[in-house]
């Protein structure tokens, strides 16, 4: 990114559309899946990205981007490869529910829209506002709150944020709290820090942008 590039404001239409999407998805998910479903990182990202759009807050937007870019790339790649080839790209089955006819079509449609939207808005916001170099720290703190809550408040059958195991079945290798602690270490190391290095190189703001923090 050239040194002279400056952050630009967010068009009102983007803010309104994101808010409308939030207003649709929240009541549907609440009724169909219950309030604990909103502990999923993708759902949290939708809430906070919408807030970041209205506030034009680079730090908050960057937190969501650094935490969600790699997972959303994996989700979309896995879904579309399965859609085209019939086989999952990754063996964890993170998108298996999208092909489960027992899951209401409305839920699957909203989920697909959410994951595509997040991937697009992450990249667009990084370009539009720039990347805040301390965002990975904020995202790590958020994960350290959300992961224990996901373990304590939800059931293994839902496996929200994969706190009960990497696949469909609960893991049996170590006690549950130990597994969550391992996740709290590995996720920043394997997702946030690599994303931070890439985003900082492409959109980092030691290159004087003027957006709000």
Image: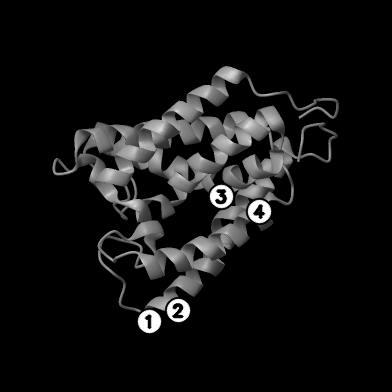
How far separated are the C-alphas under marks 3 and 4? 7 Å
Viewport quadrant of the N terminus: top right
Q: Using the rendered image of the protein, determine whether residue 112 is visible from the camera's viewpoint.
A: yes
The residue beneath circle 2 is: 178
Left or right: residue 139 versus residue 162 is right
Give the vertical position of 156 relative to 11 (above or below): below
User: Residue 139's x, y, as percent?
Assistant: 61, 54
Q: Neighbour class for label 2 at 10 Å: few (<14), some, many (≥20)?
A: few
Q: Earlier in the sequence, mark 3 or mark 1?
A: 3
How far separated are the C-alphas under marks 2 and 1? 5 Å
The residue beneath circle 1 is: 175
User: Residue 64's x, y, as percent?
Assistant: 58, 45
Left or right: residue 167 versus residue 70 is left
Q: Using the rendered image of the protein, determine whether residue 77 is visible from the camera's viewpoint.
A: no
Label of residue 136 in the image = 4
**Considering depth in this image, is 203 or 144 the residue closer to the camera?**
144
User: Residue 102's x, y, as percent?
Assistant: 14, 44
How far separated are the C-alphas under marks 4 and 1? 28 Å
Number of numbered discs: 4
> Which quadrant of the figure has residue 151?
bottom left
Q: Secondary structure at mark 4?
A: helix
**Considering depth in this image, is 27 or 107 the residue closer to the camera?**
27
Q: Neighbour class for label 4 at 10 Å: few (<14), some, many (≥20)?
A: many
Q: Secondary structure at mark 2?
A: helix
Q: Neighbour class for label 1 at 10 Å: few (<14), some, many (≥20)?
A: few
Q: Residue at x 71, y 23 (%)?
A: 9
Q: Neighbour class for label 3 at 10 Å: few (<14), some, many (≥20)?
A: many
The residue beneath circle 3 is: 67
């Amino acid at each position: 990114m050239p040194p002279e590039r400056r952050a630009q404001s967010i068009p009102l239409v983007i803010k309104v559309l994101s808010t409308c999407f939030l207003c649709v998805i929240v009541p549907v998910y609440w009724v169909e899946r219950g309030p604990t479903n909103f502990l999923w990182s993708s759902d949290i990202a939708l809430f906070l990205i919408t807030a970041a759009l209205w506030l034009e807050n680079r730090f908050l937007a960057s937190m969501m981007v650094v935490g969600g870019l790699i997972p959303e790339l994996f989700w979309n790649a896995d879904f579309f490869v399965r859609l085209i080839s019939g086989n999952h790209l990754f063996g964890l089955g993170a998108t298996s529910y999208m092909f489960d006819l027992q899951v209401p079509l409305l839920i699957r449609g909203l989920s697909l829209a959410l994951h595509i939207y997040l991937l697009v808005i992450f990249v667009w916001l990084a370009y539009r506002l720039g990347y805040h170099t301390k965002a990975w720290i904020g995202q790590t703190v958020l994960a350290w709150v959300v992961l224990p809550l996901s373990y304590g408040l939800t059931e293994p059958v839902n496996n929200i944020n994969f706190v009960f195991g990497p696949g469909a079945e609960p893991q049996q290798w170590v006690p549950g709290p130990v597994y969550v602690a391992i996740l709290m270490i590995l996720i920043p190391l394997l997702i946030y820090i690599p994303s931070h290095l890439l985003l900082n190189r492409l959109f980092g703001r030691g290159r004087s942008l003027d957006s709000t923090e």
